[in-house]
Image (cartoon, rainbow, N blue to C red):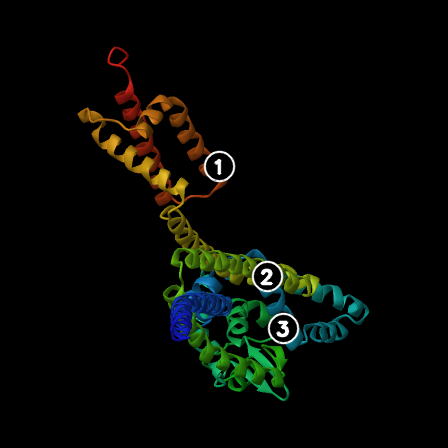
């Protein structure tokens, strides 16, 4: 019985030790499983943060940076649709404020009552003439310079709108209005002689800048023109005052959360890579997911821009499209650069991986590089170099074809054109030298 008890106790101890070993072996597997789960979680968090941060960074850089603001808005002054819209709006504002048709009717009723019926056509003709003059003013270099200086001075006021301290954008009653009196005054000053003939006395216009208080500017213009201008003259309604508070609140939340999203993105990427049991795979997952996000955001931005333009009045769509496309092109350029960076990371991660084809490709590149350097020195050539030498002519032709396709389907700057020529020249020279080095001595 004693021997039987000893055997049972030994078995029990063996079972205990076995279960303990299994428990200890299970701990690393559990840790590995937890690391994989948390790596995926942090990849998802990073992608969500990037979804918000990419357009957020573009918006902050475009709206809050004066140089970028001027770079986007400045060229709009040279757009034909914008010039047409500006000249129409300025002329209409002036003729409505001065009530030109009433003055023409009054003059005709005194001088030639029977001709009073042509007051409308005369007014239309004069208005068309004035609009042509305003169109020339808007298309002049002087106006381009004025536009650039105006939007540069306006930018702090745009920021002030978001902060709730603007004087250019004001609340009148329950409406938020934008003051473009400086532009009106600039146009008036350029056609003061024409206006003097319409009004019947010489006018001397005041100096109005973006810093001039609108009520003061309207009072000075009224005095100079000899008419009582409405308080809404030279302003355009943007939206209701209640909407402004929502925009300002959104801007405040945007500024507070953008940097938090950026910080969380960086932390999530680092933690995902640290916790991952296969960092290369995690990096590839991140790069692919971010590429998909950026592509979707680009498509969404284009779709929304087209929708916004389609909602405008037909007469304003051309000018609206120019404005929307100016900001859209800035966003597309930013996302395009982001895509190039992500694609570069993706390519490097794949080509440096342990995949058999990647290993063979790296060996090929190393072999070809050594052969290219040692071709003229009579160095031993590897299989890759021998293959290149055997296919010298097709490869050289292919290099020229690829360069031609790039030039045909892309618009390269002078700098990138020179880079393409250098790369093509280096490729052609290397292939030629390898071909010469692999030829039999009697053929060389």
Residue of label 3: 93
Residue of label 1: 408
Q: Tag 2, which secondary structure? A: helix
Between the residue at mark 3 and the residue at mark 1, the CA separation in whole angstroms equals 48 Å
Name the residue at the bottom extreme: 173
Front residue (pair 404, 45):
45
Sequence order check, earlier mark of 1 and 2: 2
Considering only vertical position in the picture, is 89 above or below 255? above
Considering only vertical position in the picture, is 222 above or below 327? below
Q: Which mark is residue 64?
A: none
- Closest to the camera, between mark 3 and mark 1, is 1
Between the residue at mark 1 and the residue at mark 2, the CA separation in whole angstroms equals 29 Å
Q: Tag 1, which secondary structure? A: helix
Classed neighbour count for the residue bearing mark 2: other residues with Cα under 10 Å, few (<14), some (14–19), many (≥20): few
Residue of label 2: 300
**Residue at the location (39% across, 55% down)?**
280
Front residue (pair 432, 227):
432
Classed neighbour count for the residue bearing mark 1: other residues with Cα under 10 Å, few (<14), some (14–19), many (≥20): few
**Where residue 83 sits: x, y (%)?**
56, 60
- Closest to the camera, between mark 1 and mark 2, is 2
Left or right: 361 as drawn, with respect to 107 = left
Sequence order check, earlier mark of 2 and 3: 3
């Amino acid at each position: 019985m004693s021997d039987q008890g000893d055997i049972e106790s030994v078995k029990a101890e063996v079972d205990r030790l076995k279960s303990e070993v299994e428990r200890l072996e299970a701990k690393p597997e559990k840790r590995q499983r937890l690391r994989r789960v948390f790596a995926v979680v942090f990849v998802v968090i990073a992608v969500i943060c990037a979804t918000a941060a990419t357009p957020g960074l573009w918006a902050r850089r475009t709206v809050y940076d004066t140089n970028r603001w001027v770079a986007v808005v400045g060229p709009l002054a040279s757009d034909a649709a914008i010039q047409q819209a500006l000249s129409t709006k300025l002329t209409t504002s002036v003729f409505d404020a001065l009530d030109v048709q009433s003055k023409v009717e009054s003059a005709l009723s005194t001088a030639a009552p029977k001709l009073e019926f042509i007051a409308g056509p005369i007014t239309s003709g004069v208005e068309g003439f004035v609009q042509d003059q305003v169109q020339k003013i808007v298309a002049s270099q002087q106006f381009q310079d004025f536009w650039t200086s105006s939007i540069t001075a306006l930018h702090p006021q745009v920021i002030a709108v978001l902060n709730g301290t603007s004087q250019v954008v004001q609340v009148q009653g329950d409406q938020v209005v934008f003051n473009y009196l400086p532009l009106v005054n600039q146009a008036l000053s350029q056609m003061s002689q024409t206006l003097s003939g319409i009004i019947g006395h010489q006018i001397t216009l005041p100096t109005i800048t973006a810093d001039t208080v609108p009520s003061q500017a309207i009072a000075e213009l009224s005095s100079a023109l000899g008419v009582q201008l409405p308080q809404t003259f030279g302003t355009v309604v943007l939206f209701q005052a209640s909407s402004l508070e929502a925009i300002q609140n959104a801007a405040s939340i945007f500024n507070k959360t953008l940097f938090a999203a950026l910080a969380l993105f960086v932390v999530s990427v680092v933690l995902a890579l640290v916790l991952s049991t296969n960092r290369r795979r995690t990096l590839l997952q991140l790069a692919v997911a971010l590429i998909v996000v950026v592509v979707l955001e680009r498509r969404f931005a284009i779709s929304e821009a087209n929708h916004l333009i389609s909602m405008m009045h037909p007469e304003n769509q051309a000018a609206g499209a120019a404005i929307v496309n100016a900001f859209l092109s800035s966003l597309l350029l930013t996302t395009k650069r982001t895509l190039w960076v992500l694609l570069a990371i993706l390519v490097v991660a794949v080509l440096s991986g342990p995949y058999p084809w990647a290993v063979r490709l790296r060996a090929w590149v190393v072999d070809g590089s050594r052969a290219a350097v040692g071709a003229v020195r009579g160095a031993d050539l590897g299989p890759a170099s021998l293959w290149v030498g055997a296919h010298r002519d097709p490869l050289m032709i292919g290099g020229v074809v690829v360069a031609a396709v790039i030039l045909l389907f892309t618009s390269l700057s002078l700098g990138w054109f020179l880079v393409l020529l250098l790369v093509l020249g280096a490729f052609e020279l290397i292939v030629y030298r390898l071909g010469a080095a692999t030829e039999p001595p009697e053929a060389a």
